[in-house]
Each structure stands twice: as C-alpha cells, then as structure tokens.
Image: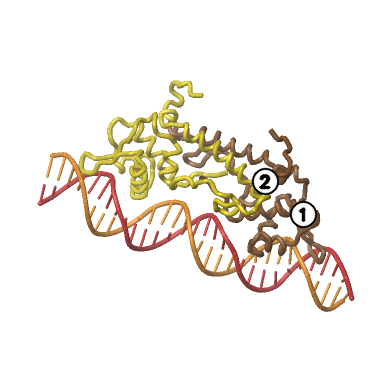
Chain colours: A brown, B yellow, C red, D orange
DNA sequence: CTTAAAAAGACCTTTTTAGTCCCCTGATTG
DNA sequence: CAATCAGGGGACTAAAAAGGTCTTTTTAAG
C-alpha cells in the first residue's frame, strides 16, 4: 500500500551494510555494492549523520560507521531521518489540529490507531534484529 | 507518517456525505458542502463507482448513492478505489518477488507485518462504524 | 427535443522525487 | 605546506506524480 521512497530504501540498505562491517566503509564502496548512485547516497548519508544514526569521517582513512550500537537504531529512525519527522497528529480531514467537521472526523481516530500500530513495529525493530535473521534467533517478542 | 492524498481524503468525505443521505446527492451538492473542486470530485466519483462503492445516475433526477449498505463498505476499499489496488507483496529492497539480497531483506518481513496490521484496521472499519461515532456506541471490538 | 446531470478524456500546473554537479572543508601524508 | 582523498553542502535539473481544469459526449427525465 504505502511504499518507501527510493531514498529511504537506499538508506536502509546503506545502514545495514555499514552495520555489517567492522571497519568504516567509504560512500563509494557502499554505492558500488548496493548500486546506489554515489552522489545521491552522499546526500542520504548526510541526513543520517544529522539524524545521529551514522558517523562519517573525511580524509584518507575516513568512511562511515554507525553512531550508536546496532541494538539501539530502529528502522523508524532511518525513515524519519530521510523523510523528515513524522507529522504531529492533526485532523485527518482538514490537516489542522482543530476539527470542524464533527461527524466525518471519526475517521481520524481509526487512522491514528492504524498508524500507531505501524510506528510501534517500526520503532521496535532494530538493526540487530534485521541482521540476526536466518543465522540464530534472538527470541525477540 | 503516511498521509492520505488529497484525492483519497476527498473521496472519504464524499462517501460519508452520501452515506448520511437518504436520497441521491448531486456531485455539485457534495462539492459545495465539502468544498471539493467539482470536476475533481467528478473523477473521484467515477473511481468509486468503478470500484463498486457508489452508484451514479445521470439526468435530471440523477445523483450519487451507495452501491452497497454502509455496513459493507470499508475505509480500505475507498483508499484502494482511489489509489489503485494495493501492491502485492514483493521484496522490499528491490521491488521484485525474487529476493537476491539475503541478509538485508529481513526488513521485508517487518514491513509486511506492519502493513498487514494497518490493512486489517482499515478493512474492518466500515462506513457504519464511522457514522455512529458520538451518537450511540455499537460495541465494536 | 431540451435540459440537467454524470462520464470520459485531453490538457495543464504545481509539487515531489530522484538525481547530478561543482565547489568547499577537513584529514592524512609525503 | 601542498597534494590528495574523503565527506559536506548548496544549486540545479529532469522526470514523474499529484492536483485540478475544460470540453465534449452520453444518458435520463420532462
């Protein structure tokens, strides 16, 4: 139904690459391995470093690594870093915090609930959960 | 996080208007009451009639009404009618049904689960549920 | 056959997405 | 300190999607 934008998808792939590496990776390397346009990836890495998910160092021995442990970085954070913070809850039907349409706005509640479910799943899923997959379960609820 | 498009939102409002009326409504009427551009609304109504949600009759005593009872029309159907059918599950990371990237694709599962939750809520919510709101509960789970 | 309403499709405008390009800044090393 | 290699960051662009208009056609009722 809802799909990630190309940028967000690239970002997820890039972060997972970095998470799997012991040493810093160059943007160029990630770009090649994941076939993401280098200059576009560069932008995404900027967003991710600003978001506090990645750290990047310049110069010859530079490269990108995780800013925090795998266990503490959620998929939701990656999405937010790329697409901007989630919009605060507003009336679905007129995009304000006021709600002049009394009857119709009942949809608001439903939508809110649906979104909260999704957000919970995405925020509970950490990089470490994605990486264990297939080689040893970690018994996550 | 994810927002309805303007069209989908208009469609929901329009369908709710129709659902509240005993007699058929003209597109013009809905357009005025909901302040939706008339010719744009006209398109949306077409999508909704094609989707089997609304019935429209032409001519002097024409207008739009529900094609099925309020209890049988879900919010999800409205969304699908406007935005096309939900895409079938594919690998999140490369948009095919194959999944060449073994490790990274674990994200697929999570995303799938998150979407299913949302879809379930939206498909269980019928027009009747939205209209009862505030004037008599119907004990829906 | 006139009138009123939806259907349909061509068209247009604005916004968003996806990406490129180029120069700047910071670190390393000879 | 200069060369070089890496990321930072802004301006820019092309293409696609969203949002909306306009005009003509079809259908139904009086």
Residue D12, image x, y percentages: 57, 69
Can residue A124 be seen at all in this image of the molecule? yes
Residue A106, image x, y percentages: 47, 31
Residue B53, image x, y percentages: 36, 38
Residue A5, image x, y percentages: 57, 53
Viewer-side label of 1, 2: 1
Residue at the image point whose x is 54% and y is 38% from the top: B116
Mark identifier at residue A66 = none
Q: Chain of mark 2?
A: A
Instruction: Classify B133 as above or below D13.
Output: above
Q: Which residue is mark 1?
A: A21
In the picture, the quarter occupied by the N terminus of chain B is: top right
Q: Nearer the viewer, residue A26 or A33?
A: A33
Q: Nearer the viewer, residue A15 or A113?
A: A15
Q: Residues within 10 Å of mark 1 (few under 14, many from 20)?
A: few
Label 1: state its secondary structure. Answer: loop
Could you give the CA–CA distance between mark 1 and mark 2, rounded to whole angstroms? Answer: 20 Å
Residue at the image point whose x is 79% and y is 60% from the top: A57
Mark identifier at residue A77 = 2
**Same chain, marks 1 and 2?**
yes
Answer left or right for B9 relative to C20: left
């Amino acid at each position: 139904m809802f799909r990630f934008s190309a940028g967000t998808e690239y970002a997820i792939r890039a972060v997972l690459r970095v998470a799997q590496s012991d040493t810093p990776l160059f943007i160029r390397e990630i770009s090649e391995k994941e076939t993401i346009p280098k200059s576009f990836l560069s932008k995404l890495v900027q967003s991710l470093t600003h978001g506090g998910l990645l750290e990047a160092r310049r110069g010859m021995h530079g490269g990108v690594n995780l800013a925090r442990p795998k266990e503490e970085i959620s998929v939701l954070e990656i999405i937010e870093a790329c697409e901007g913070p989630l919009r605060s809850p507003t009336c679905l039907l007129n995009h304000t915090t006021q709600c002049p349409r009394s009857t119709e706005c009942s949809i608001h509640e439903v939508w809110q609930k649906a979104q909260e479910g999704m957000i919970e799943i995405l925020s509970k899923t950490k990089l470490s959960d994605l990486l264990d997959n297939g080689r040893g379960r970690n018994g996550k609820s």
